[in-house]
Image (cartoon, rainbow, N blue to C red):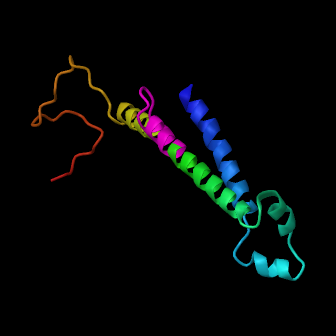
């Protein structure tokens, strides 16, 4: 439950961080506004001449901090999850178990071992002397 809530907060903060970074004006934006471009007039009337930069910078810092906290929290929760493991680990373990079961033939315990010196028939032909 807490993981889902943190994941939702994390995604919202990621989108908000992208939006806030795109809203901020670069250092060269004032040169473009001097030639008649840009929409710096609307943001200056709302926040003042330098108020928008300070507000957006502080909001970006706050949202970035929340984003990093949720990132670390999600990493900690998923790393310490009990009862589950990685999909890769599960598939490797299954492959090892299957190969161990199918590669090695099992000999019943009641079958006597062959003597090495006897002339028992085998699938391997003998070498003539």
Judge from the rendering whether residue 25 lies leftward or rightward of residue 39; answer left or right: left
Name above or below for residue 100 compared with residue 25: above
> Does the magenta stretch mainly form a helix, a strand or a loop?
helix
What x and y, as percent, mark residue 28? 73, 79
Which stretch did the figure color magenta? 70-88
Q: Residue, x 78% and y 82% (percent of image)?
A: 31
Q: Quadrant of residue 108?
A: top left
x, y (%) of residue 34?
A: 84, 81
Q: Where is residue 20 in the image (x, y as percent from the top left)?
A: 70, 56
Quarter assignment of residue 25: bottom right
98 vs 86, nearest the viewer: 86
- For the N terminus, the quadrant is top right
Name which residue lies at 64% across and 46% down.
13
| Residue sitting nearer the eye, 116 or 70 | 70
Residue at horizontal 21%, vertical 19%? 109
In the image, residue 75 lies in the stretch drawn in magenta:
yes
Q: Where residue 63 sits in the image (x, y, percent)?
A: 61, 49
């Amino acid at each position: 439950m807490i993981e889902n809530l943190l994941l939702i907060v994390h995604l919202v903060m990621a989108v908000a961080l992208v939006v806030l970074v795109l809203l901020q004006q670069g250092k060269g934006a004032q040169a473009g506004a001097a030639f008649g471009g840009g929409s710096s007039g609307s943001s200056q009337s709302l926040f003042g001449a330098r108020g928008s930069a300070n507000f957006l910078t502080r909001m970006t810092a706050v949202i970035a901090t929340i984003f990093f906290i949720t990132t670390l929290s999600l990493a900690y929760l998923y790393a310490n999850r009990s009862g589950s493991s990685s999909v890769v680990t599960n598939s490797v373990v299954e492959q090892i178990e299957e190969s161990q079961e199918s590669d090695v033939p099992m000999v019943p315990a009641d079958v006597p071992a062959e003597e090495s010196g006897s002339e028992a028939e085998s699938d391997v032909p003998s070498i003539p002397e």
